[in-house]
Amino acid sequence: MSTPVGTKVVIGAFTLSGVVHLVRPQVFEPLIPERLGQPRPWVVGSGVLELVCAAGLATRQRWAPALTTATLAGIWVGNLQMALDVLRSRRPAWQKAAVWARMPLQVPMMKAAWTSPTSHP
């Protein structure tokens, strides 16, 4: 059974993002709300989680679709907060549009993750 394109996209995105979280955590640290404390553990933890999800989808683990979809839902909430914050910023209109444009793109990623095939009943 071949892996659906949507699943491959999620695996690729999570692998790339997970590696960047671990190799260059400072890229993501400004996105962590201050009320959560030190950002580094959150960034590293989320990077590890993305890599676990990618590996789970790639090896068709039974738990992987649900965990990946839940992770994407959490990322979506964070991206929504970032999009709301950028509206109040002095950033150029094109940057504001780019932040908002990616919001609906996560919905097909969630669907692809949720419907990813598993080989473990």
Image (spheres, grey):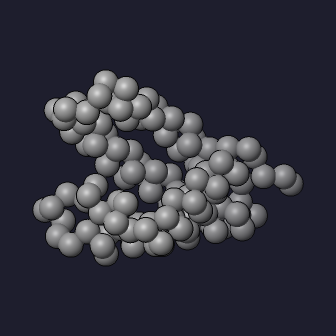
**Horizontal relation, residue 113 to residue 29: left or right:** right
Residue 52 picture location, percent across and down: 55, 70
- The picture places residue 78, in percent across and down from the top left corner, at 31, 48
Identify which residue is drawn at 78% across, 52% down. Answer: 3
In the displayed structure, would residue 117 be above or below residue 112?
below
Q: Residue furthest right?
A: 1
The quarter of the image holding the C terminus is: bottom right
The spot of residue 88 in percent (x, y) is: 16, 32
Above-or-below relation of 55 to 102:
below
* Residue 115 in the figure: left or right of residue 79: right
Residue drawn 86% across and 54% down? 1
**Quarter of the figure with residue 90:** top left
Decide: is 30 above or below 91: below
Res 102 seen here: yes
Q: In the image, what residue occupies the spot 26% across and 42% down?
A: 81
Q: Is residue 46 left or right of residue 7?
A: left
- Vertically, is 24 above or below 92? below
Residue 31 in picture, x, y percent from top left: 28, 55
On screen, residue 48 versus residue 55, left or right, reads left
Image quadrant assignment for residue 12: bottom right
Between residue 54 and residue 95, name the one nearer to us: 95
Q: Residue at x 20, y 57 (%)?
A: 33
Can see residue 64? no
Observer-nearest residue: 44 or 58? 44
Q: What is the count of numbered marks?
A: 0
